[in-house]
Image (spheres, rainbow, N blue to C red):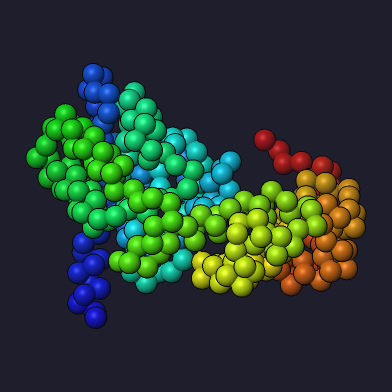
Amino acid sequence: MTSSWAERKDAMLPFRLTGQPDSRMPLYLYGVGTQEEKGLHRPGGFPVYQLFLVRNGGGQFNISGKGTIIMGAGQLFALEPGIAHEYTPHTRTGGELGFIGIGGESAESVLRTTGIMCERPRTLTAFELIWSQMTELWKGLDQGGMSMWQMSTLIYQLILDLAQAMAPVGYVSHVHGSSEAGLEGLNRAIVLMQAHYQDDLLLKHVAEAVGYSVQHLNRLFHQHYGVTGHQYMQRWRLQKGLEWLNEHPEASVKEAAENVGMEVNYFIRMFKREFGETPGKGMKLRNQLRLEQTLHPRQK
């Protein structure tokens, strides 16, 4: 087991960047690499289009303007330039995340025309073949054996192969054991929860909206987040309650609770369990800090 794990670590492909592309090049490889599944945090986004590939493992993206997106093994996800995002793996036990940066004036049209720029991750058939093509790109870049024009040709071919390898929605990968339909349903449930946290939204209503039973939806939440659907929704409401209190320092705790659709005593109890202090105590400390900053501003 130890030697096998060492071999996997050696097989990781550190991210490599290309040089300045020729201005005549409509599509070019910006960079490529892989890593053990660990977090990514890019508040400023990335300068070019990114293609993400998950080999084993899985995780979740938090993406500005798109919410939370679950990504499973054997899947592809594409992201536009300049979009703030972070990625958190479900586990740290051997999963790999591959990423390819693609630039050029034709990048957007090619990626959209081929269907790669989807709102949600897509499962790939023949995933290992695609992964090996990405590895060959990395080797060519790392060893300096190919020109930018040759790499542009290869990246275009990879895009075509990716489009051909995208499985129909609902396809179940027997190799990786993940169902794109299941992840789509979970993602739809998360979007509903995040959009309607202020409403009287019950988990059974969410399950009905995405076509699942409550039991099945809870299984998906527990598999990917380690909590039930109700716990996920409750934590989201508490987080939004904390944000609202920070934005409205003069408001009451009762107003904060009502703003996130929770009864005030229950909100206080759950808030303390989640954040370690009551919302009232937190408000008092933040208001005191603001007052001190007003009376004693820092000298520039």
267 above or below 118?
below
Residue 269 in the image, given as x and y percentages of width and height: 81, 71
Q: Can residue 18 be seen in this view?
A: no
Count of marks placed on residues: 0
Residue 141 in the image, given as x and y percentages of width and height: 18, 42
299 above or below 98?
above
Task: Residue lying at the far left in this picture: please name it.
Answer: 145
Residue 41 in the image, given as x and y percentages of width and height: 48, 50
Q: Nearer the viewer, residue 193 or 104?
A: 193
Residue 163's quadrant in the figure?
A: top left
Q: In which quarter of the image is the N terminus?
A: bottom left
- Does 240 sit left or right of 58 as displayed? right
Residue at the image position 62 percent from the left and 51 percent from the top: 191
Residue at the image position 29 percent from the left and 55 percent from the top: 125
50 above or below 284?
above
Q: Is residue 108 visible?
A: yes
Residue at the image position 44 percent from the left and 35 percent from the top: 81
Residue 21's quadrant in the figure?
A: top left
Residue 140's quadrant in the figure?
A: top left
Residue 280 in the image, given as x and y percentages of width and height: 86, 62
- Does 116 sit left or right of 291 as displayed? left
Q: Which of 78 and 124 is in front in this view?
A: 124
Q: In which quarter of the image is the C terminus?
A: top right
